[in-house]
Image (tube, rainbow, N blue to C red):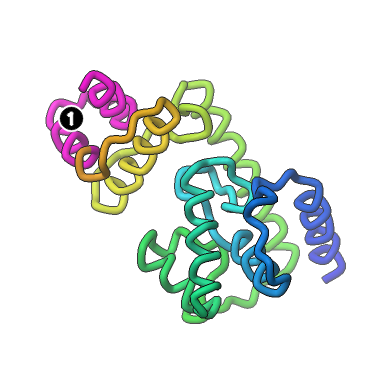
Amino acid sequence: MKKVLTALAIVVLGLSQMATAVTSSEIMLDPRQDQRARALYGEVRCVVCQNEAIGDSQADIAADMRREIRTEILSGKTDKDIREGLTARYGDYVLFKLNNNSYKLSVNEDILLTHLKVKVLVNTLSTSIMGLLGRFEGNVMTWVRASNNKLIDRAARYIQEILKQQNKTPSYNTIVEEIFKQIENLQENEPIVIKVVEALKKN
């Protein structure tokens, strides 16, 4: 247990030193509501970033998601209502924490720590390789295989974020239509995100 607490303390210390993306204009007037909002910011994953909480993300969509949370808090919704609304809209992936219906496993602490270390190492190597292969645009993954509705939606949001940074704002439906159009002629090693971005920039 001591090892787990030590690891958690290191993580908490590291997180406390990270710069937050939340601006002064986003602070809620009621301190208790602001505390609730910030706690939720830490639970919610930015949908266009690499495992980054919306409270730490500079992406426009993360700011939109923070605004959505504040609005729902002001409307009287509970944290549970807000979480359920986010998962209904973005899928279970959007929450870092497991919900109450998830299975609880009892595991040896040393095994858990070993698995966590391996996962961090694998994620770091994977991200580094993707970077060397040029499969990022800023902090957005461009290599997405749009093989089902969930991945098509993810690709569309990545495309939306990249184009927004270039002051282009095509509708979500326009982006999805272009994805289906480009998929028909997509070569095996072509990134669908970049291909659609380039096509929409010409329009």
Which quadrant of the rendered structure holds the C terminus? Answer: top left
Q: Secondary structure at mark 1?
A: helix
* Residue 96 makes an appearance in the image: yes
Instruction: Check disc 1 and give the amino acid type.
Output: Gln
Is residue 201 toward the left or the right of residue 137 in the image? left
Number of dots carrying numbers: 1
Q: Position of residue 135 (x, y in %)?
A: 44, 27
Q: Residue furthest top?
A: 202
Residue visible at 60% across and 60% down? 41
Q: Position of residue 142 (x, y in %)?
A: 40, 32
Q: Is residue 150 above or below residue 140?
A: below
Q: Position of residue 145 (x, y in %)?
A: 30, 39
Q: Is residue 79 above or below residue 111?
A: below
Q: Residues within 10 Å of mark 1 (few under 14, many from 20)?
A: some
Is residue 185 shown in magenta?
Answer: yes
* Residue 103 makes an appearance in the image: no
Residue visible at 61% across and 37% down? 124
* Magenta portion: prevailing SS class: helix
Q: Is residue 99 above or below residue 195?
A: below
Residue visible at 52% across and 33% down? 139
Q: Position of residue 122 (x, y in %)?
A: 59, 42
User: In the rendered image, which residue does mark 1 sit on?
Assistant: 182
Which quadrant of the rendered structure holds the N terminus? Answer: bottom right
The residues colored magenta run 175-203
Is residue 146 toward the left or the right of residue 160 in the image? left
Q: Nearer the viewer, residue 33 or 18?
A: 33
Is residue 114 shown in magenta?
Answer: no
Residue 200, by quadrant, is top left
